[in-house]
Image (tube, rainbow, N blue to C red):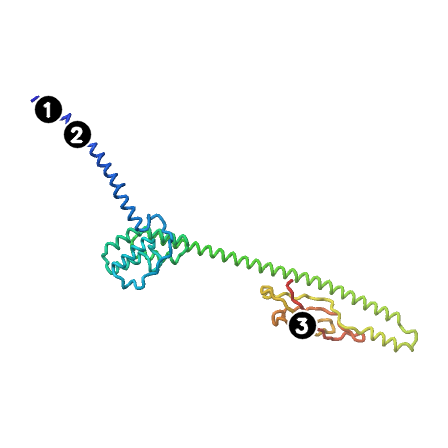
Amino acid sequence: MDTRYIRHARRRARGAVRPAAIAIVAVVAVLAAASWFLIIKPHEDLLESEAGGHPSTPVTAGRAAPPAPANVAAMSLNQLLSEARKAVNEQRLLAPAGNNAFEFYLNVLEKDPGNQVASDALRETFPVGASVAEQAINQRDFNEAQRQIDLLAKADPANYTLTILRSKLDAQRKLQDREQQLASDKEKQTQLAAQKAAADKAEAERQASEAQQKAVAEQQQKAAQARLAQQQQSEAARQPSSTSAAPATAAATSSAATHGPVLIRNVSPRYPVTAVRANQEGWVEVSFTITPDGNVDNVQVVDAEPRHVFDRAAVEAVSRWKYQPATQDGSPIASQDKRRIVFKLN
């Protein structure tokens, strides 16, 4: 046989194989895709729906959870698995406490450590449980979030997602503490500002009262001096023309030269700071002695309302008052007086 014919036939055979191989690969790819969409994908969707939805979808609260079984420890494996499946279907993966899928599956593993159904269920539902715990953190339900993270840790203690959840929980707690501290500081600043404003107002009113009382005292002093000058002029005009009128004139002069004490300097009391803060008002009644040189001595508290709040301020203020002393027959004498000192904020 001619060798050239043989080589030509082989080349034709190899050329025919290549399109066939390509066609086979295409058919296999189509079958694989069809299997994925028609068989595998629906099966996975079914598993996800039984586990409570896609792991990235937060589980929302549905209807009210049924009451927890009375004695979980006494339940059999089948009863625990049944309760766990029911909890998964009702989206009770981690809550409420004592009546959720994770706790039922963990109880199964306590009774039967090698139970494959419980192990597979915990592994498949772990991502959804992590999403539920993250939702509790975002809602700042920190105690519930901590309980759910602890429950997840029992199911898969080495899962890295637990580290992320714990970090988020710690960060949210610190953020809340900072916000509460800032709110507390702001409230304190507001209170201090209000107290300072009240104290400033009381001080301004006290200074105004002192100025007013000082002006009144000066007017009283001037009036007393004018009366004294008038009395002296009257005495000079009524001087006796004969010795027979001397006794009468002396008696009149003696009477005109006798008068009571006249306040010439009034010092307002300082409003106690504790009373300003407590928004307290009241009065103090004091008795005291006016010495012959016009000073105030022996100040005593007779009565007060309320007691022991304004006493010291009243005594200190009255002790600094200045009088034109009382006179008798033209000579200054000691005298007694009593005053009520009123403490009022407005």
Front of the two marks 2 and 1: 2
Image coordinates of residue 108 in percent, x first then y, are 26, 59
Which sits in the foreground, 126 or 70?
70
The residue tagged with tag 3: helix, strand or loop?
strand
The circle on residue 6 is 1
State which quarter of the image contains the C terminus. bottom right
Front of the two marks 3 and 1: 1
Q: Residue at x 28, y 46 (%)?
A: 44
The residue tagged with tag 1: helix, strand or loop?
helix
With respect to residue 266, does 128 lie above or below? above
- Residue most toward the right? 242
State which quarter of the image contains the N terminus. top left
The residue tagged with tag 2: helix, strand or loop?
helix
**Three-letter code for the amino acid on which mark 1 is drawn:** Ile
**Three-letter code for the amino acid on which mark 3 is drawn:** Glu
**Three-letter code for the amino acid on which mark 2 is drawn:** Val
Q: Residue at x 78, y 65 (%)?
A: 222
Which sits in the foreground, 240 or 175?
175
Q: Earlier in the sequence, mark 2 or mark 1?
A: 1
Instruction: Count every numbered label the image shows and give the total.
Output: 3
Q: Quadrant of residue 155?
A: bottom left
The circle on residue 17 is 2
State the separation of the CA atoms marked 3 and 1.
141 Å
Image coordinates of residue 183 in percent, x first then y, are 49, 56
Residues tagged 2 and 1 counted as in contact (Cβ below 8 A): no
Which sits in the foreground, 31 or 169?
31
What residue is pinned by disc 3?
Answer: 285
Image coordinates of residue 190 in percent, x first then y, are 55, 57
